[in-house]
Image (spheres, grey):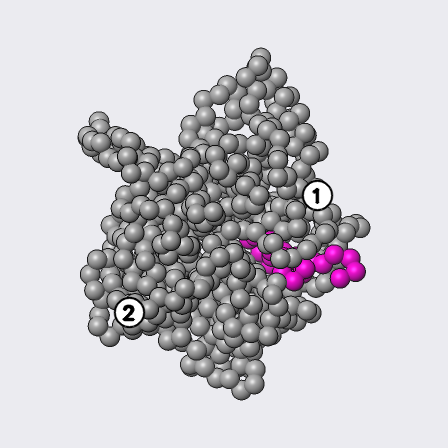
Amino acid sequence: MKTHIRPRRLLYGGAILTLVAAAAVVAVVANRPAAADEPVVKVKTQSGDAPAPAAKDGEPGDHTMFGGTPDRNMVNFRDKFPASKIPSIEDGKFKDEGDVVIKWRADLGSRAYGGPIVAGGKVFVGTNNEYPRNKRDVKKNADGDEEPVDMGILMAFNAGTGSFLWQGVFDKLPSGQVNDWPKEGICATPLTEGDRVYFVTNRCTLVCADVNGRAGGKQGIEKKYKGPTDAAIIWELDMIKDLGVFPHNMTASSPMVVGDIIFLTTANGVDEGHINIPAPQAPSFIAVNKNTGKVVWKRNDPGKKIMHGQWSNPVYAEIGGVRQVIFPGGDGWLHAFKPETGEPIWQFDANPKNAVYELGGSGTKSDFIGTPVVHDGKVYIGVGQDPEHFTGIGHFWCINPAGKTGDISPELVDKVEKGEDGKDKVTGKPNPASGMVWHYGGSDDRKFVPREFHFGRTMSTATIVDGILYISELAGYVHCLDAKTGKKFWQYDLKSSVWGSTYYVDGKIFIAAENGDVFVFKHDKNPQVIDELDNPDAKDRKDFDVKRKAKRAQIEKLYLLSKAEFDAPVRSTPVVANGVLYVMTEKNLYAIAPKGK
């Protein structure tokens, strides 16, 4: 029986535009101009469904960013991966025969959430230093024994052989766990473009480095770690020192490049007591010149309304002819801005007005861990919280912001009254300007159902293909919905927490669970409606469970192709690049290929 492992704190865990924006860019903080010495740049953009450009000397099937493209949809239409049976793994080897072989296995640290990214014949992942690659990065403990120095690590491997190439090494912040939780290394997924790799470190810095490390005599600006297998850093933006950000526990935003600008969230959040916000005026969302590391614009819209931290990722799209970058905020709102200037376009409250945030996750109001997806002009997002809070009532939204500005939430505040506990009680009213298309979630009062809500908090990002939407939630349920209407076709309980996302390739849906199980489902353009919890004629709980079990078996027969048990937790999303499946457990990275490839 596998041990269910949950780490102490939260981790991680389209096309680049064609139109050319000729307007000069003005840097802003909220609605105020920023310092005059911040750069003026132009945004070069590409529209359409073309894949992201391959890295320099790379392959068209490279996987260069979180979600693969700036629309963040977890789909891969380029690759073929005909294998569907993946055997279980024990001690790094397959236990029995399947349709695939292990090309290679690489050792990581003891935590891994960021990645994998595959580009230019290399694989990049974020991890910690619990498997030191350099004897320099160990120390002697009180007993005189050697142990790893706690650090954040970005590792680079050869995609063909799995051999270690180089690593970026980053010391822990001296402030400790309030800003940089122990043993949690680099948590966010990096991004590659050409011969550059961009990533966010445990020190709340945005780094641009050479994809080849120090090979060929490259030096970079790094002053402390300058060995032959260290990173060649081109520039580094310190969001604490330069922007006044106070990251809560860790920094975990996966950057996105649009033209010459990198967009990311900053992780600004609450203090150790989870009550005060030390830096409400610090930016939550920033745009940075990818060539220089200079801030182009910045926004602090969540401000004093941040509930906890900010660990989600932005998305880019052109919707209704309007280019926009959309940020999930720590206030539970989506915020859309003009990518060139940071000028606000629209905002969307992803919680009902009567929802209340409570410390420790007992409330009904949430922020975001999952990333928005833009598909067919619609925005899709689910709310979530730090996984330490575990599950609770959740909401998944489909939003159409085309032609809209300002507040496009489903509700507006009607009135605010003081409750008996002295806290504000908010009542909402319909918003005539709402951009909501549909909502999935809310209370579930059906008899004998195992919980009181339809959809729980999620850390996951949606997969949308052929009008079908797949979304997982932290509690381990995978939901299959109609992307146009929100109608549920089926849901399936993986029996373990899910930190990653569903992923489509070659007619199949891959998803990994925290207990190490990797599932492969068959994608169906016309799925059957099989709601295992919809048993209104059940006489009692026992009868309900019998009917539910029968429906689960029906779903498995129709859609479940295989389940593989890996030998360590998986808190990331399996991806396919150039015909190879990459599965990252908390301690190893596997490259898996169909037999004969």
Circle 2 — which element? Answer: loop
- Label 2 crowd bin: few (<14), some (14–19), many (20+), radius 10 Å: few
Q: Which residues are magenta?
A: 570-597
The type of residue carrying mark 2 is Ala
Quadrant of the frame with the C terminus: bottom right
Quadrant of the frame with the N terminus: top right
Q: Is residue 448 left or right of residue 334?
A: right
Magenta-span inclusion, residue 593? yes
- Label 1 crowd bin: few (<14), some (14–19), many (20+), radius 10 Å: some
Residue at 30% in and 67% down? 23
Q: Which mark is residue 562?
A: 1
Magenta-span inclusion, residue 6? no
Kindly report which numbered mark, 1 or 2, lies closer to the viewer in this rendering: 2
**Residue 44 in view in this figure:** yes
- The location of residue 251, given as percent across then percent down, is 40, 59
Q: Is residue 298 left or right of residue 33?
A: right
Residue 422 to residue 189: above or below: above
- The location of residue 10, given as percent across then percent down, is 45, 51
